[in-house]
Image: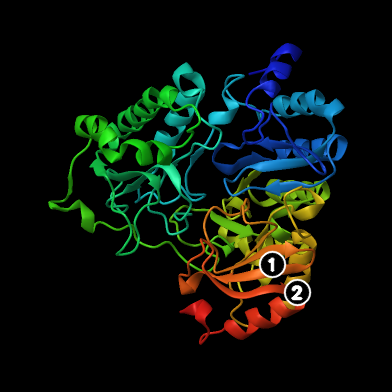
Amino acid sequence: MDQLSKHTLQSSVADRRSACPGLFRMARALDGSICRVKLTFGNLGASQARSVADAAQRFGNGVIEVTNRANLQIRGVRPDTENALIAQLLAAGLGPLTDRGDDVRNVMISPLAGRDKGKVDTRPLASRLLTTLQSNATYLSLSPKFSVFIDGGEAVAMVDHPHDIWLSPVDPDNPSSSYAFGVAGIPPTKAGDPPALGVVAGERAFELITALLDTFIDWNPAHPASSRMRHMIADAGSEILSGPIAAHADSQIHGKDLAGWRRALPRRGGGHLGVLGECKDPTRPVGAMPPLGRLTPDLLRSLASLADKYSNGLLRMTPWQSVLLPEVAPDDAASALSHLVSVGLSADARGPLATMIGCSGSAGCGSALAATQADGLKLAALLDGQAGIPHIHMSGCSKSCASPSARPVTLVATSAGHYDIFLRATNGPSRFGKLLAANVTIEEAAELIGQNSGSGGPLHA
């Protein structure tokens, strides 16, 4: 798409104002509007990165966020600059295939998809689906929250984010593996997880996905307030999918009961950080985390320069809200990592800022009760140097916008500078886990987290 008329931009912005922000529909916040820049599988060229940096500086407040779907958000956009911002991003090649296709660009794969030639390469299937979602008018009514995850069984993958439809290879070491699949959830990894709904041959996976989508589209008009697969399953049960499953899927895996299949757990503990050696590709991805998943224009320009120097001009955002240089020569990997750290990113999973995430907080969101960004930096400074610090999520309210799944430790704001602390490992009654302490200060939170970390604490149970 080379150019869109002003009328098209204005009409697109007016559509579905209550939905997620997008390129053509910017959501209002305390610090201005939010423009979400969707990236195909997290990919961002160096020249595109510079365009985003310039746009954030010219039309926003200079804050650029990496999202948990591996996209970018430009914050603080002024209403009178929205069309100019859109035009600049479109000129950089960051728009959808069609003017109504932006909302439905929600197909996720691993940041390492296709890097190991002996494993399933999910990119062709994901690319075909992404094109169809944007170009087939039937699917343009899907919610901006509706998402599909196509897993390749990679050791570095985000498998605990719920998706409307998910596929995962039965045998990831076989490039022609069939896929287990399910809806409204995640691939099962533990004994008590809901099992897959079925198995589909790789060559029939696209038809299965579109058949599941068609079933939802057919059901949705009678339930206009429902936007996700989980709503349909709650209303009609999984039996509503029996038709497309019978038409496209098998019921067993290698002669074994489907209920017994489990996806192998991906690498834990910051597997997306540092020099990644899990693939047989001749280049090495090198990853690091910007503070709390946020970039400044100058930092993004620095990353673009590093991409030009080390990674064939390529950057890749990840669902951990981190950044990869995806194509670094092995001899350059240590130098690339050193430069990522020198510009302000964290690459050692033992450091609190390497894995800490947070929402915009009260500086940008009317729902937030505390300044999560400033408080997160303060907490990280207090925890720096301590052993066994877990992954921490700073949430300004109970909506948990920064993370769709529970983190080992979640701080939920109760008032300015005060938080409830939840531990996921205790499997408590809250969706965040079990309450460790209520209404504590950042200093008290640092002390409690330190006491419960390390090899003997409940965070590592």
Residue 365 spot, x, y in % from top left: 75, 48
In this picture, is 413 found above or below 181? below
Residue at point 24% right, 43% down?
199
Residue 230 spot, x, y in % from top left: 41, 41
Drawn side of residue 415 relative to residue 168, left or right: right
Q: How many labels does the image show?
A: 2
Give, as a three-letter code, the residue at label 2.
Answer: Thr
Q: Which mark is residue 441?
A: 2
Drawn side of residue 258 relative to residue 262, left or right: left
Pointer 1 local density, CA inside 10 Å: few below 14, some 14–19, many at least 20: many
Front residue of 411/300: it is 411
- Quarter of the image for residue 403 reads bottom right
Front residue of 358/63: it is 358
Residue 83 spot, x, y in % from top left: 79, 23
Drawn side of residue 207 relative to residue 291, left or right: left
Front residue of 228/275: it is 228
Whether residue 67 is visible: yes
- Quarter of the image for residue 333 reads bottom right
Screen quadrant of the N terminus: top right
Residue at point 76% right, 14% down?
6
In this picture, is 253 found above or below 229? below
Quickly name the residue at label 1: 353
SS class of the residue under badge 2? strand
Query: In whole angstroms, how far apart are the C-alphas of marks 2 and 1?
Result: 19 Å
Q: How is the image coloured?
A: rainbow
Screen quadrant of the C terminus: bottom left
In this picture, is 281 found above or below 121? below
Whether residue 203 is visible: no
Q: Residue 216 carries which label?
A: none
Residue at point 54% right, 41% down?
41
SS class of the residue under badge 1? helix
Which of pointers 2 and 1 lies earlier in the amino acid sequence? 1
